[in-house]
Amino acid sequence: MALIVQKYGGTSLGSVERIKNVARRIAKWRAAGHDVVAVPSAMAGETNRLIALAREIQPQPDPRELDVVASTGEQVTVGLLSMALLELGLKAKSYTGWQAKVLTDSTYTRARIVSIDESRIRRDLAEGCVAVVAGFQGIDAKGDLTTLGRGGSDTSAVALAAALEADECQIFTDVDGVYTTDPRIVPEARRLHTVTFEEMLEMASLGSKVLQIRSVEFAGKYKVPTRVLSSLTDPLMPVEEEARAGTLITFEEDPHMAMEQAVISGVAAQRDEAKVTVRAVPDKPGIAYAILGPIADAHINVDVIVQNVSHEGLTDLSFTVARADLPRALKILKEQVQPHIKCKEVTGDDRIGKVSIVGMGMRSHAGIASKMFRTLAEEGVNIQMISTSEIKISVVIDEKYTELAVRVLHKAFELDQE
Amino acid sequence: MALIVQKYGGTSLGSVERIKNVARRIAKWRAAGHDVVAVPSAMAGETNRLIALAREIQPQPDPRELDVVASTGEQVTVGLLSMALLELGLKAKSYTGWQAKVLTDSTYTRARIVSIDESRIRRDLAEGCVAVVAGFQGIDAKGDLTTLGRGGSDTSAVALAAALEADECQIFTDVDGVYTTDPRIVPEARRLHTVTFEEMLEMASLGSKVLQIRSVEFAGKYKVPTRVLSSLTDPLMPVEEEARAGTLITFEEDPHMAMEQAVISGVAAQRDEAKVTVRAVPDKPGIAYAILGPIADAHINVDVIVQNVSHEGLTDLSFTVARADLPRALKILKEQVQPHIKCKEVTGDDRIGKVSIVGMGMRSHAGIASKMFRTLAEEGVNIQMISTSEIKISVVIDEKYTELAVRVLHKAFELDQE
């Protein structure tokens, strides 16, 4: 008998029939003797519909009011899912974010959870009730509605699991787990049975849509055992089987596991970035700030930054930004920065791809980077930029080689082997 | 400089363009120096859509959960209307029912307002803010969401006006006021500039869709000057003109007004009732209860009840019910009541119409009833049942004469004359 928090994404709730299937799945876990807290997202498409409506009224919607509007999507699904559970004869009760006392800061549209008072939910669970808690939303200290931003329901679920000290947080989504790479690029991609928190964090930051990065951070901070699994399977598949399905995010490195573990866990690809290069700037203190300060002031996020070694007192500085931000970044550099620093030219390139390998194993294995670079060189793929962390190596390459790079790296690191 | 509460119905908010028009109307009142509290309904059709969705999940939706779902309609419109006001450069802030502290009892789906803590709204008004408060919804003492039932936004608006001691509550709807009768039946029908609270109450109970009966009761209890007016006029019509538009519900009988006032104010027609007759029952104590008790137990509302004088110890008892309830009422009487009382037969007639005349003036004028009956007799309309109150006389007639009766009564009481 365990306490399980189950998060269901919008696709899982996209129709009346799917909502009923979610209820059947929950009923199965209840029948097996477990306490269940369900955290539904809005029905697929609903949040987009509401935001589009708001934008028709106000092209730049007021953030406070946008949250009032957008948070209704989850309020509808908690009510509907509770009805579906009641219709199956279960005890069930819905909670909005504020009813579950999900206290957040006041950063409308991307608020952060400060605390959850789980006492009322705990009382209802003790009475055999399924608690159905709205994801994505909370309330700030002033009593205003807030939302947690895109994918915020993942964070709601993990935060609830942390507050309730749940045995597991199950994220039901439309993929059946975390893969070694995108199966659409590499058909041999394998589902990972476990992935460490650190790897998951890198993968999330590399654009994996499986889990929102903040939910992974939350899981790591509170050591919430979190499992990603599919909501598209038979809702009545045996509980024992479902309990082992998907991918479990782990925290302790099991020494036994570590020996068997592959050196790297996955290969990730991103093609939504663009590269900016400032050529032949004087290599002197403060130059990086002179270039990147105005970019940050314009709220443009910068990802990889590379500064080459200086040559005759001049250096090149390159960085990547979201592709959509490239024109704005170039404008700022040409109009606000170039007149003040001496540089030869400012160029942009939006035809780049970023390919990364991620793995806890690389911490204790030498030569991973060189193996990566050699593999790419053998295929004639030129590396434009390199960025590394303790468990990740990213390279920026010509966009047209992105899929090739993923395939050869997946094979070189034997990710297709169990 | 006055404090005005303005309620906007679903039709007034049925599209983005209409929401913007509502904002323009509010802006106009603000520009004229008035404080405005706006109470929007859900966008036209939205509440029905949400209820239909709930019924697909659970044919008899759980009332608590239904309120969670249904109350989102107004939450969306308070957000959107606030955005539209902000976009016009006004200060504006939305409130859900619970944020405005609209405390209700726990009768989900038709809760009654217990109190409103208007202090936060008052603070925002003092800062020059338009307060946009969700109609139709509240919160009970347990912290559960509640809704006030169909048309509940009218009640929300009047209750807010009472709590804020507003100078006027303006109900913007898709008709431009209260008429002497249905203009679709009598083209000469006139809009009333004023109507007394008591008359409005009778009209609402006679099926006038202009105002929900509970909002009229609320207006009466707290003496809230309430004006019904159209939201389909030019939103920029001069404030002075709009302030005199529509129909104002009054409370004090102005002696000067009363002298000029017509004897009756309006003629109402209803064709959604059916008549049940229990023939030749023993005329003894308890018989009305024996017949009507089981009907009430089945939650069937009874309107007109007539018991004829007894004849040889036997009497006939007739009453009207909503037409949709007729089959159920007959079944109950035949299966549960007839076996226990001696009666000749139980019959039903769903081809009846009810025509009523309403007017404060009839209190001080004799002969109103006889004039009504004579007018109908002259047209060969047979009266089947009669029911009276201090300011209303209703007759039940053959349905096919309903419109004829309305027309001749409207003319006989000179309602077409200013």
Image: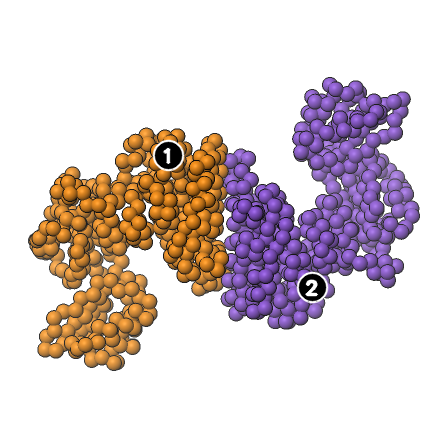
Chain colours: A purple, B orange
Which chain does tag 2 point to? A
- Which of A206 and A302 lies nearest the eye of the viewer? A302
Q: Secondary structure at mark 1?
A: loop
- Which of B328 and A404 lies nearest the eye of the viewer? B328
Q: What residue does disc 2 label?
A: A167
Above or below, A46 relative to A36: above
Above or below, A38 relative to A276: below
Residue B262 in the figure: left or right of residue B206: left
The C terminus of chain A lies in quadrant: bottom right
Q: Residue at x 39, y 38 (%)?
A: B36
The number of numbered discs placed on residues in the rendered structure image is 2
Query: Looking at numbered disc 2 in the image, what kind of residue is underneath it?
Result: Asp
Q: Residue at x 89, y 24 (%)?
A: A311
Residues tagged 1 and 2 counted as in contact (Cβ below 8 A): no
Estimate the spatial distance between the alpha carbons at disc 1 and disc 2, rounded to whole Å. 57 Å
What percent of the width, then of the height, locates residue B263?
Answer: 13, 47
Q: Residue at x 53, y 59 (%)?
A: A94
- Note whether residue A98 is visible: yes
The N terminus of chain A lies in quadrant: bottom right
Q: What residue does disc 1 label?
A: B34
What percent of the width, then of the height, locates residue B281?
Answer: 18, 76
